[in-house]
Structure formats: structure tokens, C-alpha cells
């Protein structure tokens, strides 16, 4: 259990993505972040790469390499989520323009190189965004899926319903073909859908712990998550917005906080009405072999203690 | 044909899974380059379509794709690196370059996903694929290259690449190299002529079973002839185009807006991505048949 896991974060940084990879970077006793790869999603890829660098500079951890990846989904036109995260994806607190350069290579190539240069089962992909880069990496290296320890991803929605269409969660909706490829790849997938993340709301009380810490990182994320929260509060009437993406990090650090089931998941790539729906066969009515562990519940109190605790180490 | 033409400089051959697996395809490209005494770099690309599993065409072209005669390269090996990176690098370094695709469009779709602005650097992109306004060859609705990776075909047709589509329909009928012409080609008594006919013998048999036409249908060389000599395209017109990826029955079907109705109010919704992201692409409808056959003979001399 003491092995330090090597991980790559594939992400389209809005603040909850940044919390996810910073909390991992702040957990060197358990996780070694090999790289951050960015993709078009919440905002265009130029901005997601910049936001990753901003977050790393804030945390003074520019030793972690950042690679920019796919500017658009595999087949479809890009859909973004400025309505939630603001124009920059990082609205709510002005972080300085990053000075750190991006790495030269393409994200999908970096994923292949980092994974395949290590023994089988060494690397876990942490996916917080549309799965375009991961699908491109699998196209580049057909052995990639089986060479990973696994993929832990935030995406999909079951009985919670969708957040970008009535049927679909944003990450799957933006690039359903990429998601389908990843779920068909044979990789060991852990999927954290909205059903789980919507139990983890950033209440005022939880948010206050960030401000109270009085650190640069705590203050910045207090304001960034506060901005995020406004959308969810206005839209859903919740006491706070969900902290979606850091569930991926929390699962790697403390899987006992989650409960789920091994099931078959398929992605709808055809119907306009339900495009990008992750169809979870919770009751195994099709009798197909499971391809994912779907986590459906979370101990929210312990989750925030863990993740904000790690974030405030920085 | 291109390697033997004094008028073009082939910068690379990039191989994709299709008729045969990508490694076999790479060996076939290397063998053919060796036959021509060419040192053109050959790169291996995608081993499977974008989303779907590969369904090869061994039933048509033989297990090795060249009629199972044991053609193997003697000395040459593929270049290191992924074909998609080679495509991007070479197109970026050569503004106005002409590109021809003779297989499923997976590599090109991957290149566009990685680098969408690539399209602006391409002067011409001849695509052998689709069956515009006619029946297909692998299903009643679809031509093989589009059918096997319809998502890739869609991504490429919805891009800004300046495409000239050479569909299956113009490679049939009078364009087929008939029995008499096969004799003429073999009469050239060159290794190129012998290879051209022999490597296609299982395809000729399969084609006869499928269509009742006797001879060798050569869609890829037909497209190449048009790349090398654009005047061989006698009738062509520009249209919005898309590929069906959704339906089982019409998977991979090339849909051409021949009557220009895609922009009508009732169609704007369904065609919105094509109208917003894509451009009108050129579809070749008729070709100079004697000219094509002359070009083929010339190349095999």
C-alpha cells in the first residue's frame, strides 16, 4: 500500500480541475504527478493550458510539465462551458499571466511516451475533461490501454440527469466518440459520475476553511470557487457548487470514501436527444462484461477535509 | 504511378489500417517502393478506425492485401514515428502541398484533430472514397473507405481541406481495366506491369462476383491519375457533403447536396455543422477514360 502511484492529469482547467491536480501534487507520499496534459473543454485549449500553468505558478510547482493537447473533439465541433466558468475558465480571481512555457510536445504523444516508457501497470490516467487526448493517445499506441494501471475519470450521469443536456454530462457530451473509444479500450476504468459529485457541495462553511488559512493558494481558490458557486446556486438553488474533479484525486488517496459497482458502460454517439449519455447497466440487464467501476456515493465531509487539507499544504 | 512519375516528388507514404492491418499495409507499401527503386519514407499510422474496430477487406484483396503471392520487402523498413505526426510535419513544412488519400481517413482525421489549421496549408486533397449518388461496394449504401471509418470520413469532409472526391462510381464500368487491356499491360513485360495485374488478381475475381464486370477495377490508381493530371476530371462540381455515421443500414454513406438544398430552412438544423465548419467540396462525376488508361500504361512501362 505504500507504493507511490505515478499519475498523469488530463484536464481542461477550471478551478475544480486545478484543485484536483494541486491536491495530488501536494500528496507526494502517495502520488507522483508525471505531467499535466490539457485539452479543449470548459474553454478552448489555449486557455486550459494557460490555466494549468497559472495554477502551478500559484502553487510554485512549475516543475510539473504541462503539455497542450487537442484543440477540438475527434469528430464534432467544440462545445465549451463559459456559462459556468466564465470567459477564461478561471474567472473570479486574477492570477498573473503565466511565465512558464508549455512543453514542446503534443499531449497525446506525451501520454504515450510517459506511459510506455514505464513498466506495465505503472501509470494511472486521471481524466477531468473530454477524453479527446486519451483517445488520440490510444490511436497512436494501441497497447496503451492495457499498459496503464487504470483510468480514473470524472464523467457521465446516471439518475442525476445531465448538466449540459437533459441526458448528458459535459465531458462525455463534448466528445462522445472519444469517450466511446476509451470505454471500449479494455483499460481498467473508474468512473465518477454527477451522481457522486453532486453529493460534494462547496458550502459556505467548507469554502471558508480556504479563506481562513490565509495562504496564497487558499485565498485564490476561495475566490475562484466562490465564482463557480454562483452559477450552481443560481441554477439549482443549492447551498454551493459541486467540487467535481477533485473526486478523482480523492479516490486515489482514499478509495474508502466512495462506494460503487463494477458495471458495463456504453456511450451514446448517435441520437441528438441523448448524445453523450453514459449508459450505465447498473442492474446488468444486458449481461455484458463490466468495463468500469462506477462510483455512486461519497463521504462528502471526509472528502472536503482530505482535499482542502492537501490543497492547503501548498 | 506517383513514384514513377517524373512530375511529382513523393514526400511520404503514410499507412493506415484498412484493406489489411496497418503492419501488413506498411510491408506492402515498402515492397512497392522497393519495386520502384524508391527511397520514399514510409510511416505506419493508425491501427484501427477512430472509434470502431477494424473490419478489413481480406475477402476482396487477399489476406495480405496483394493477392497472397508472398510479396515482401527485402531491405526497407518503416521510418520511426507515427504517420500522423509525419503528415502534420510535412504539410506544415510544404505550403500548397498536394495530398491523396487511398484508404480509410483515420490518419487524416487524427492529424486534423491534433492540428486543425493544417487544412490551410494543403493545396489539393484528392480523396478516393465514397459512392456519391450511387450504390456502394461494401454495403448497398457505402464504399469501403468511408464505411470502415465513417467518423474519420465525416471529420475530414467537415474540415476546411480542399477535397476532390473520386468516388467508387467513376472507377467502374468503362474505367475498369478489361481483359484486352490486361493483356496489353502484361505485354509491356515490365515488373511494374506484372505486379499491377498479379497483385490484383483476387480483387478481380471478387469484383466479377460482385458486379458481373470482367476486369480489374482500380479505384486508387484512378484517383492517382486524377491527382497527377487534373485534366482527366472532365465533369466535377462543388457541394456540401457529409457522411452517415449513425444508421446501421446507411453507415458510411456519402451524402452529396447535389441539388443545393442543405442551406434551406428545413435542412439547416441537420446540416448545421457542415455549413458552419465545412466547405463545399469538389466531386468528380466523369473522367477521361482513355486518358486514365494511357496514364496507367505509361506508369507501368
Image (tube, coloured by chain):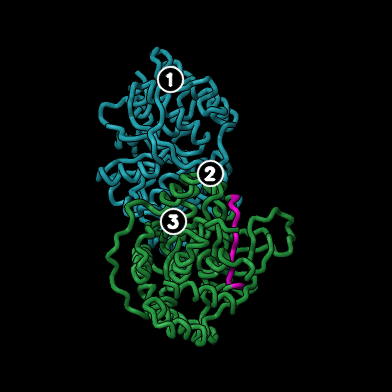
Chain colours: A green, B cyan
Q: Residue B46, percent across and down? A: 47, 42
Q: Which residue is drawn at 45% across and 84% down?
A: A230
For the residue pair B262 and A291, the one nearer the viewer reads as A291
Disc 2 crowd, CA 10 A, few/some/many (<14, 14-19, 20+): some
Where's the C terminus of chain A, which quadrant? bottom left
Tell me the mark number nearer the camera, choosing from 2 and 3.
Answer: 3
**Chain hosting mark 1:** B
Q: What element carries label 2?
A: loop
Point out the tag, 2 or 3, that comes first from the N-terminus: 3
The residue at which mark 3 appears reads as A34
The residue at which mark 1 appears reads as B74
Residue A180 visible in rendering: no
Relative horizontal placement of residue A260, taking residue B95 as reference (left or right): right
Q: How far apart are marks 2 and 1 (CA)?
A: 28 Å
The residue at which mark 2 appears reads as A143
Q: Give the range drawn in magenta.
A: A186-196
Disc 3 crowd, CA 10 A, few/some/many (<14, 14-19, 20+): many
Q: Does the magenta segment cover residue A64?
A: no
**Chain hosting mark 2:** A
Q: Are marks 1 and 3 on the same chain?
A: no
Q: Residue A274, percent across and down? A: 58, 66
| Above or below, comparing residue A58 to residue A92 in the picture | above
Amino acid at each position: 500500500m505504500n507504493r507511490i502511484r505515478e499519475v498523469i492529469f488530463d484536464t481542461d482547467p477550471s478551478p475544480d480541475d486545478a484543485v484536483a491536480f494541486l491536491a495530488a501534487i501536494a500528496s507526494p507520499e502517495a502520488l507522483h504527478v508525471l505531467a499535466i496534459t490539457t485539452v479543449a473543454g470548459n474553454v478552448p485549449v489555449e486557455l486550459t493550458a494557460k490555466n494549468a500553468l497559472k495554477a502551478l505558478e500559484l502553487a510554485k510547482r512549475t516543475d510539473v510539465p504541462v503539455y497542450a493537447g487537442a484543440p477540438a473533439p475527434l469528430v464534432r465541433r467544440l462545445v465549451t462551458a463559459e456559462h459556468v466558468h466564465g470567459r477564461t475558465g478561471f474567472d473570479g480571481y486574477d492570477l498573473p499571466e503565466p511565465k512558464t512555457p508549455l512543453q514542446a510536445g503534443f499531449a497525446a504523444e506525451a501520454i504515450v511516451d510517459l506511459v510506455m516508457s514505464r513498466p506495465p501497470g505503472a501509470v494511472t490516467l486521471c481524466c477531468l475533461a473530454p477524453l479527446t487526448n486519451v483517445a488520440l493517445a490510444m490511436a497512436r499506441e494501441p497497447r496503451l490501454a492495457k499498459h496503464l494501471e487504470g483510468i480514473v475519470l470524472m464523467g457521465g450521469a446516471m439518475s442525476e440527469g445531465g448538466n449540459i443536456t437533459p441526458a448528458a454530462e459535459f465531458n462525455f457530451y463534448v466528445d462522445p466518440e472519444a469517450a466511446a473509444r476509451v470505454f471500449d479500450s479494455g483499460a481498467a476504468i473508474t468512473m465518477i459520475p454527477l451522481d457522486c459529485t453532486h453529493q460534494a457541495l462547496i458550502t459556505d462553511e467548507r469554502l471558508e476553511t480556504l479563506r481562513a488559512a490565509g495562504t496564497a493558494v487558499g485565498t485564490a481558490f476561495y475566490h475562484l470557487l466562490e465564482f463557480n458557486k454562483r452559477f450552481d446556486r443560481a441554477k439549482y438553488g443549492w447551498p454551493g457548487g459541486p467540487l467535481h474533479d477533485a473526486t478523482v484525486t480523492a479516490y486515489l488517496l482514499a478509495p474508502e470514501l466512495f462506494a460503487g459497482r463494477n458495471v458495463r458502460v456504453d456511450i451514446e454517439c448517435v441520437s441528438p436527444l441523448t448524445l453523450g449519455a453514459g449508459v450505465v447497466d447498473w442492474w446488468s440487464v444486458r449481461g455484458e462484461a463490466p468495463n468500469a467501476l462506477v462510483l455512486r456515493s461519497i463521504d462528502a465531509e471526509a472528502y472536503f477535509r482530505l482535499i482542502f487539507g492537501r490543497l492547503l499544504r501548498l | 504511378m506517383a513514384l514513377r512519375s517524373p512530375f511529382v516528388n513523393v514526400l511520404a507514404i503514410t499507412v493506415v489500417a484498412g484493406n489489411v492491418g496497418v503492419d501488413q499495409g506498411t510491408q506492402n507499401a515498402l515492397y512497392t517502393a522497393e519495386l520502384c527503386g524508391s527511397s520514399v519514407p514510409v510511416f505506419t499510422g493508425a491501427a484501427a478506425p477512430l472509434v470502431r474496430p477494424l473490419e478489413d477487406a481480406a475477402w476482396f484483396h487477399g489476406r495480405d492485401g496483394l493477392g497472397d503471392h508472398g510479396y515482401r520487402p527485402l531491405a526497407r523498413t518503416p521510418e520511426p514515428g507515427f504517420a500522423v505526426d509525419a503528415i502534420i510535419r510535412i504539410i506544415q513544412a510544404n505550403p500548397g502541398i498536394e495530398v491523396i488519400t487511398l484508404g480509410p481517413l483515420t490518419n487524416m482525421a487524427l492529424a486534423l484533430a491534433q492540428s486543425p489549421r493544417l487544412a490551410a496549408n494543403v493545396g489539393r486533397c484528392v480523396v478516393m472514397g465514397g459512392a456519391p449518388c450511387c450504390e456502394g461496394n461494401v454495403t448497398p449504401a457505402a464504399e469501403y473507405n468511408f464505411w470502415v471509418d465513417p467518423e474519420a470520413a465525416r471529420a475530414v469532409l467537415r474540415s476546411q481541406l480542399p477535397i476532390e472526391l473520386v468516388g467508387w462510381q467513376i472507377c467502374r464500368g468503362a474505367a475498369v481495366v478489361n481483359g484486352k487491356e490486361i493483356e496489353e499491360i502484361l505485354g509491356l513485360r515490365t515488373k511494374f506491369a506484372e505486379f499491377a495485374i498479379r497483385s490484383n488478381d483476387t480483387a478481380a475475381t471478387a469484383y466479377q462476383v460482385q458486379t458481373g464486370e470482367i476486369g480489374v477495377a482500380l479505384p486508387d490508381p484512378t484517383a492517382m491519375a486524377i491527382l497527377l493530371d487534373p485534366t482527366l476530371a472532365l465533369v466535377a462540381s462543388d457541394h456540401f457533403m457529409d457522411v452517415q455515421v449513425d444508421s446501421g443500414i446507411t453507415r458510411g454513406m456519402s451524402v452529396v447536396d447535389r441539388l443545393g438544398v442543405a442551406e434551406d430552412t428545413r435542412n439547416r438544423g441537420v446540416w448545421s455543422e457542415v455549413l458552419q465548419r465545412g466547405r463545399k467540396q469538389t466531386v468528380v462525376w466523369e473522367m477521361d477514360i482513355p486518358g486514365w488508361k494511357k496514364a496507367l500504361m505509361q506508369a507501368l512501362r
